[in-house]
Amino acid sequence: MFERNIYDQYGFHCDERWQLGSYEGFDAGGHSYLVTPYSRQEDSMLIQFEWAKQLHNAGVAEIAQPVNTVGGGSVAKIDGAQQLVFMLPQLDERRAGEFLTEGGQLAHIHDVSHGWVPNVPDLNYLGQWLDIWERRMGQVESWHQQVDARRQKNDFDREFLYTFPYYLGRAETAMQWLVEEGREPLLQSYDGSINHTRFSNQSWFATNERTTQVKLPLEFVYDHPARDLGERLRAEYREGRFEDGYSFISEYQNGRTLSQGTWSLIGARLLLPLTYIETIENHYMNEGTHAENRSADITNFERELAQEERYLRYTAQCLMEHLPSTTAGSWFTRRNFA
């Protein structure tokens, strides 16, 4: 069915099928293609495709390019689902110039896409952090009240009730920092660039030994560059890779200087207990549908809590280095992490 759909919709004869993580791929006519789910409104998707073309024209290497169907459409029914097909970059597309490092390439993306404001709201996150954080923490607080009122509580409930006050304080500190130090309310529409939904060391993927930083346009959003940098550092610190985070920032700053304002926004993102929020959301939003996973949920929760000291120690170390006057006397720099 897959091969037939590909031929009918795109005119390609599949020479070979393969798997890349959760994605299906295939080779045809000397090119490699990736099949991905269709997850956004069409107007948003078309803007992401236009961004991909503009970035490619600006010299950004290894961007997967969308492929239209034989009828000129963007979406096709493949294996019973609406999906997209992207052509992966060829081996010789990689530039041998100054942007070979991952941090350098990200700096180049942020630089050339500065001010590319989308005309659809669901791709534009610039200036929206405070509203989003308040809304998500409000939901977590609502769950806390509901769980506290329960007669019967399981292990996850008890751990949630015990840890919530600390994480609420963390979130409030992050939001205060965002407004007072990051000055998010003062950001202008042109202060943003192309970012990723959640940038980590796995956002760009390898298809072979030479194309190792392939970028998928469906990950593109518009926001302040601090989004990508903060989320990359969060991912590194949570995995205990402080030096990798330091190296990445050094690579980035070889191509683009970071201002104190940007570091303040990065600091706000790092202080926000996002992994904790997501753990609580995932559990209570699905509480009635996955009772059999309660044991796994509490195990994951305990793992998250165990990583917290190291994560906050790395965050404090980073912010004390880059924002020494701002962090002086802050509670997270005074804490004993022994």
Image (spheres, grey):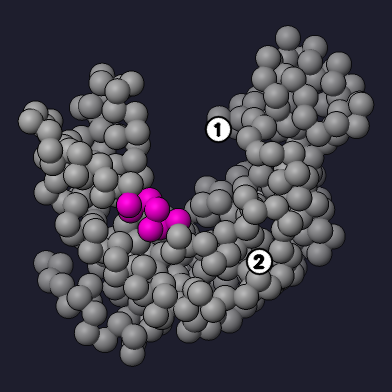
User: Of the residues shown, which amino acid type is indicated by label 2?
Assistant: Ser
Judge from the rendering whether residue 137 lies leftward or rightward of residue 256; answer left or right.
left
**Mark 1 lies on residue:** 21
Residue 57 counted in the magenta span: no
SS majority, magenta: helix
Magenta span = 132-138
Quadrant holding the N terminus:
top right
Q: Nearer the viewer, residue 248 or 288?
A: 288
User: Of the residues shown, which amino acid type is indicated by label 1?
Assistant: Gly
Judge from the rendering whether residue 314 lies leftward or rightward of residue 86; answer left or right.
left
User: Residue placed farthest to the top in the image?
Assistant: 1
Q: Nearer the viewer, residue 70 or 175?
A: 175
Q: Is residue 211 visible?
A: no
Which element is circle 1 on? Answer: loop
Quarter location, residue 254: bottom right
**Mark 2 lies on residue:** 193
